[in-house]
Image (cartoon, rainbow, N blue to C red):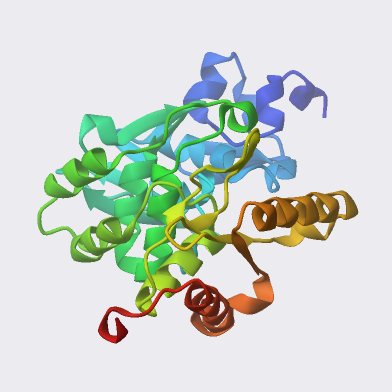
Amino acid sequence: MAALDRLPEFFRTAPFTLDEARAAGSSYGQLCHRDVMTLSRGIKSLKNCADAPLALLTRPYTQVTGYAAASHATAFTIWHFPGFLPGATAPTIHISRQFPHASMRREGVSGHRTRLFSDEVTSLNGLWITTRSRTWLDCAHAMSLDELVIAADHLLRIPRPQYEGRDTPYATVPALTALLDSHHGMRGLVKARQALRLARVGCDSPPETRLRLAVVRAGLPEPRLNVAVQLAPGVERTPDQSYPDYKVAVEYDGATHADPAQVVKDVTREEDFARGGWKEVRIMKSHMANDAEKAVSKIRNALYDRGWRPSGDQ
């Protein structure tokens, strides 16, 4: 192990390229050590690197070959997109190369040959990767429409700086529209356009998006999303979804709402809505089965109680 003790610390935690090793002064003998594995041409790893994060495992593949970037399911996972993408958990690494360069052919790599504009690739701690917006478009063909809308809502949502350390969304509707307009004929483009038409600014989670889509499909009015309402002087609440004309507020209560302290907050919230003349509808995970059938029924009943009727019944 003495030879490996002299390897740079970074090489002990993640795969590396031969060029990086040589630039760091590693000797031929060190790189031929029995505990140094060859992952692919020009890429080495210590045997204890198997559990490294996906971004670190992928990084050398984008370094050893020019005009290459992590993309598709690999970028989807690294960017922590919400929504379900078939195959996203598979061990295969997806790498895109700029046309007209040939797609990457390496064991364990799914190579893609595509057209990448300069603003569609970025560097993430040394990893070349497609941007979040371009990743969304690349994955469009493999995702269901609803899951693609969930991912679009994630890109468009306004972040909370105090919790997320950023104050601007990952994308805007005009920027995503321009992205789609620049890739005529691309696989998944039609579905991506549909998803963008259904996407909204304001959904904070996948369940909120799924609920919104189910509500609209059922013929109910489209709700306002995370808009503050004044219930009394000095009392303001921001329901997940709301219908101000009917004073109906919809709250999706996830797993964290089982915490005793949160239960107290939820009761106080419900009392605030009641005192302000609003009816609160609380939706749980159990209400979301079968395209949110029970959730939609609860919201419909609340709207009926407040005077709403389908357009044909008015």
Query: Would you place residue 129 above or below residue 258 in this image?
Result: above
Q: Quadrant of the C terminus?
A: bottom left
105, 121: nearer the viewer? 121
Q: Position of residue 283 (x, y in %)?
A: 64, 69
Q: Residue at x 50, y 68 (%)?
A: 211
Q: Residue at x 53, y 49 (%)?
A: 204
Query: Would you place residue 243 above or below residue 128 in this image?
Result: below
**Left or right side of 282 for 230:** left
Residue that protrudes farthest toward the right in the picture: 260
Any part of residue 115 in sight = no
Query: Would you place residue 203 above or below residue 6 in this image?
Result: below
**Left or right side of 309 for 115:** left
Q: Residue at x 53, y 82 (%)?
A: 297
Q: Position of residue 194 (x, y in %)?
A: 24, 64
Q: Quadrant of the N terminus?
A: top right
Which image quadrant for residue 70? top left
Q: Position of residue 18 (x, y in %)?
A: 51, 29
How many marks the image carries: the answer is 0
**Left or right side of 278 for 189:** left
310, 211: nearer the viewer? 310
Q: Position of residue 30 (x, y in %)?
A: 67, 26
65, 250: nearer the viewer? 250
Which image quadrant for residue 237? top right
128, 34: nearer the viewer? 128
Any part of residue 52 in sight = yes
Residue that protrudes farthest toward the left in the picture: 184
Query: Would you place residue 210 above or below residue 178 in this image?
Result: below
Q: Residue at x 68, y 19 (%)?
A: 8
